[in-house]
Image (spheres, grey):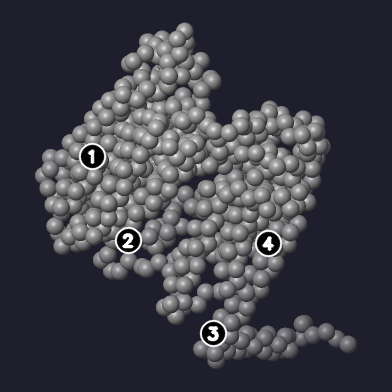
Amino acid sequence: MPATGAPGKQPSGSVTTDSPAGAWSVATVVVTAGVTAFCLAMGLSALVPARTEIPGLPSAGQLTAVGLPAVKALFDLAAAATVGWLLAAAFLVPPQRSGVLDVGGYRAVRAASTAAAVWAAAALALIPLTLSDTMGRSLDVAMTPEWILRGLSVLGSLRAYLIVAVVAALIAVLARIVLAPGWAAVLLAGAAAAMLALADTGHSSQSGDHDVAVDSMIYHLIGVTVWVGGLIAFLGLARQRVKHLDVVARRYSAIALVAFVVVAVSGVANAWIRIAYLSDLWTTPYGRLVLAKFVLLVGLGAVGWWHRRRTLPAVSSGERGPLIRWATGEVLVMAATIGVAATLGRTATPPPSGAAPSDIALTLGYDLDGPPTFWSLLTQWRFDWVLGTAALVGAALYLVAVRRLRQRGDSWPVGRTVAWLLGCAALLVATSSGLGRYSAAQFSIHMIEHMGLGMVAPILLVLGGPVSLALRALPAAGRGQPPGLREGIVSALHSRFSRFITHPLVVFVLFIGSFYAVYFSPLFGTLMEAHLGHLLMKVHFLITGYLYYWVIIGVDPTPRRVPPYAKLALLIGALPFHAFFGLALMNGRNALAADHYNRLGLPWVTDLVGDQRLGGAIAWGATEIPLLIVLIALVAQWARSDQREADRTDRQADRDSDAELNAYNRMLAELAVRDHDRPDRRVEP
């Protein structure tokens, strides 16, 4: 990843320019959009009460009632603008050949800095407003330090807003010194991570099936911010007359199409969970807001289709007027949608139907039908909307890439395809079968899932060689053309971050150390308390396992060459740490995450420590099969390496008529003659 540089030296490059005022007149559109979202949320919240006031109970007051959704709308729009401008700098605007941001990208990160400052301020303002609304206290009381500290200690939503405020403030500062797309991508990842903290708050954390609600909210938040923010950034780039605007248009068009589908599907799924009866859509305030949001979404989809058919092709011929006019109107409609969504997030959902949920359903979001058996683990699936979707999408994209290679006459090893598909299947089974269903409720099942995510799936995925496939399937940028996705992958492989993260000692510490850091600290109990924490733990084990086995047996190119003996040392060196980890669990006397498991109160788990010891035995004995697979892969790699070296030697001998061998034979002959001529070297009988 190229280094950052001082912002005082503005990059040269790609704006063919309007005047500076004209280039940044999109700021007027953004401010208008912010005012629209703010006012619409305030007006709707005055018409649609969040809940029925009960006499005798404290009330937050009208200022909180209308101020909370209004500030939330501004918060959402600022988040979208931050993400959109960072997306533009990292992926939409082609950098210079040197890898440094051009003028368009530089202006994008500066705009992201301004948007992030507004985002941070809105997040801080939401802390007392949310506290006032939740506790039923007036805003002046909720703004006192004593109440804020008390609220932060008990309310996850307040902690989430504090996390967002800190991350947004860091982005606002760091975006001022970023001059490389790679670092813009790092800031973009930080912004996306901050959005995840909000997925487990509000309606998502309180509804039934809240595991599905949280997963769908993750998709919804990221999809909305990328779609809306990307359009704001694209409009700004069009006003700047950046070079390669047609390339930017094609890239944003593809991203916007995916984002629209994600937003539509996740929005329907999220609303479906909270709507008990179909009639709730038109008989309750919540349902009517859902319908209003749906109508606006359909309208935005129609406008997006118009863009793809009419305005985007005109960009290639240099005609920007229709694009700017339609994009300006689309941004304003998006702002109205954000205003409706902000009010929707505070409006009470329709009353649920059916019997009261069990303690298990309240904690996990779903019920468990008795103790786990081989048959129930095999058949009682509950699809993981994050990792299960990743497994299916990963398999589909891999097959598309293989098909593209074969269509142009290139071959791809069948074994790699089989390994990748088996890895995707292992990921799907570990997260979406009965293993995934019971893993959040029982430690021994959780350890089976952990071994599958941390060892089995990563080994198979690494053997699939996805990076090599991508580099062969993706088109290379022609001479004089802006770099594309293939060039971005190559740049990432050669970045300093990749060299650091794939250092043998680093991957060893990440892979082994995470076992002890997660399970033998309070972190495990904290992560198990919420679905989002459990999800983050699964993603962590999958990524660290992939990095570890990529360095040891990866068929993909790595940023640094690791000799075979070092790979073997990495593999053998992990064995005692694995064994000690399993033995420590088997000999433990205190149950890990006891509060979580006691709250579930599974009738078939009467001894938490006993189930934990079973999990330790699984961890201790589950390393043999992955170790055998890795050893076979290493031996096969070394055999192929020796064969390639022998073939290289043979080809060299054919080219120079065994010149190296003949020179060696002449040297031996000369040594023999020299020894024969020197009596002191002779051995007397």
Residue occupying image coordinates x 39% and y 32% = 283
Residue at which label 2 appears: 483
Q: Is residue 70 left or right of residue 370?
A: left
Disc 4 from disc 1: Cα separation: 55 Å
Tag 3: residue type?
A: Gln
**Residue on which disc 4 sits:** 630
| Residue, far bottom | 657
Give the distance between the C-alpha atoms of the residues marked 3 and 1, in whole angstroms. 68 Å
For badge 1, the amino acid type reads Leu
In the rendered view, does 222 fall on the left or right side of 639? left
Q: Mark 4 or mark 1, which has the lower sequence index?
A: 1
How packed is label 2: few (under 14 Cα within 10 Å), some, or many (20 or more)? some
Which residue is identified by label 1? 332
**Type of amino acid at the residue the image marks with label 2:** Pro
Q: Which residue is mark 3?
A: 652
Find residue 630 and report its horizontal and vertical position in percent: 68, 62
